[in-house]
Amino acid sequence: MNVLSCSINTLNGLYDLSGVEVGQHFYWKIAGFQVHGQVLITSWVVIAILLGSATLAVRNPQTIPTGGQNFFEYVLEFIRDVSKTQIGEEYGPWVPFIGTMFLFIFVSNWSGALLPWKIIQLPHGELAAPTNDINTTVALALLTSVAYFYAGLSKKGLGYFGKYIQPTPILLPINILEDFTKPLSLSFRLFGNILADELVVVVLVSLVPSVVPIPVMFLGLFTSGIQALIFATLAAAYIGESMEGHH
């Protein structure tokens, strides 16, 4: 009974946490749901950049790649290497998922580092990089969780759940808790780093001449790229772990 009461209190605490807002927002009503409009706008911008760049780069594919095609093939090889290193020989089907995660987060982070969205004034709310919103990072982390559960179940069936009592059934609660902490750590790490980076740039721009924050913006570009790589690498590692069944 005490365990049930504690679980309910924990869920209530998480519900209250979901109502915490950082910054200002403007909302849209879609099918009876209230959504952050500025997150959808900036996400669409990022998706348009990715689709537009890919389309322009490969519209006339060459046997010997040059220019944009060469760049995108290099990015693809990089994503394949990351996936193969973390997942193993069965990495092939997961390259599109890992690549999508990496590219979306990378471009989202850089959009916040190159363009301080908060300086753009709106009648209500403020624009920011998609990954500057906790809802976006949580959604990406939950997609990763679904992916590694699917990977484990598709390879091992119901035997996948046997990992929770390995190496001893005493560790069952800890092993279950581990799967809940994975998306939490992924989402909060990404959200916290991007939010902090954007806030530092905005504060410096408002306090000092525009030339001074430039080194900080370059540092933001570097850390933003690293955060995208960390997220994609961990996502691939979790998928590989679920398929191999080791920790």
Image (cartoon, rainbow, N blue to C red):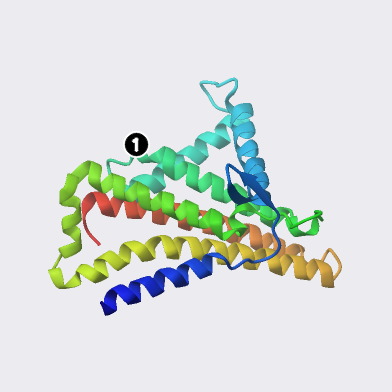
Give 155 or 142, whichever is nearer the viewer.
142
Residue identified by numbered label 1: 93
Tag 1: amino acid: Pro
243 is higher (above) or lower (below) than 223: above
128 shown above or below 202 = above
Q: Quadrant of residue 54?
A: top right
Does residue 87 appear to the left or right of 101 in the view shown? Answer: left
* Left or right of residue 14: residue 133: right
Image-quadrant location for residue 49: top right
Task: State the image coordinates of residue 193 (x, y, percent, origin top left).
Answer: 58, 65
Q: Nearer the viewer, residue 65 or 156?
A: 156
Q: Residues within 10 Å of mark 1 (few under 14, many from 20)?
A: few
Identify the image quadrant of the C terminus: bottom left
Which residue occupies the foreground of this view, 47 or 14? 14
Can residue 85 be seen in the rendering of this structure?
no
Q: Is residue 163 above or below residue 148?
A: below
- Residue at the location (21% across, 55% down)? 245
Q: Secondary structure at mark 1?
A: helix
Q: Residue at x 38, y 62 (%)?
A: 182
Residue 188 appears anywhere in the view: yes
The quadrant of the picture occupied by the N terminus is bottom left
Q: Residue 39's x, y, as percent? A: 64, 50
The single residue placed furthest to the bottom in the displayed view is 2
Seen as rendered, the residue at the extreme right is: 209
Q: Residue at x 47, y 58 (%)?
A: 230
Count the labels in the image.
Answer: 1
Left or right of 189: which side holds 81? left
- Residue 240, position in %: x, y? 30, 50
For the point 74% across and 57% down, the residue is 126
